[in-house]
Image (tube, coloured by chain):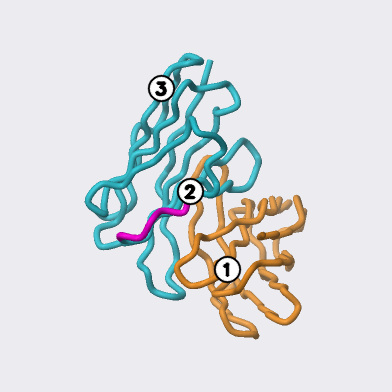
Chain colours: A orange, B cyan
Amino acid sequence: GQNIDQPTEMTATEGAIVQINCTYQTSGFNGLFWYQQHAGEAPTFLSYNVLDGLEEKGRFSSFLSRSKGYSYLLLKELQMKDSASYLCAVRPAAGNKLTFGGGTRVLVKP
Amino acid sequence: GAGVSQSPSNKVTEKGKDVELRCDPISGHTALYWYRQSLGQGLEFLIYFQGNSAPDKSGLPSDRFSAERTGGSVSTLTIQRTQQEDSAVYLCASSLHVPGTEAFFGQGTRLTVV
């Protein structure tokens, strides 16, 4: 089966850095996605990793280690608008469903 | 359309009634997903359609739930004899069947069973 774990909640200060970890155990692997979801809104795509290493996109970076079944999302220079839930999702194999973790609620404080 | 469209945006129904939720995916997207999200929780997979392949129904919680996708486009999720525990936001997403392409979500249907 599929198992995707991430912390439930994290708090950080405006301007700081926060790292959200995601560990997964899936039957096969064909990519890992990070989504952002503001309260009451639909999830929106942030990043995609399929090979080991770091993908940087502005203030957001995502890292993947396939051998460890591990990814993290790094949010730098935090802004108040970054307060949201961050969802880790894994595609176990080509053509198969996208399975989500429970999400990490990030609260940015002034 | 420009994005994934879901209707209705809100639905209040009485326990025991049937409901139909509609999803209109992005034109050309062959993959379509239904998820359920309870308040403060993650996304619970329900069903996945890919092209003409048999759908992956492994996430449907009971036989009261069913979904179809007509003509490879619009999808309808039907919940029969609704129960209070069915209350949640039902999200639809679509994507291209290309590795690495993300799924785009609709705004969801908030279902309340009273």
Residue B77, numbered label: none
Real-space Cα separation, disc 3 to disc 1, in angstroms: 33 Å
As displayed, is residue B43 above or below residue A75? above
**Residue at numbered disc 2:** B57
Depth order, front residue of B38/A1: A1
- Does A24 lie within the magenta span? no
Q: What chain is tagged by disc 1?
A: A
Q: Which residues are magenta?
A: B52-56
Residue A34's spot in the image, x, y percent?
58, 64
Q: Amino acid at mark 2?
A: Lys
Residue type of the residue flagged with mark 1: Pro
- The CA distance from mark 2 to mark 3 is 19 Å
Q: Identify which residue is drawn at 77% across, 56% down.
A: A7
Helix, strand, or loop for circle 3?
A: loop
Q: Which residue is mark 3?
A: B18
- Residue B44 x, y percent position in the rendering: 58, 46
The 10 Å Cα crowd at callout 1, few under 14, some 14 to 19, many 20 or more, is many
**Callout 2: chain:** B
Q: Which residue occupies 57% across, 68% down? A: A92
For the residues beneath circles 2 and 3, the answer to whether they share a chain is yes
- For image coordinates 43% across by 17% down, the residue present is B17
Return the disc, 2 or 3, that comes first in the chain's sequence.
3
The main secondary structure of the magenta stretch is loop
Which element type, helix, strand or loop, lies under badge 2? loop
- Give the numbered dot on residue A92: 1
Is B109 placed left or right of B29 in the picture? right
- Residue B91 at x, y percent in the picture: 46, 44
Residue B55 in the magenta stretch? The answer is yes
Left or right: A4, with A33 as reference point = right
SS at mark 1? loop
Nearer-the-camera pick, B101 or A9: B101
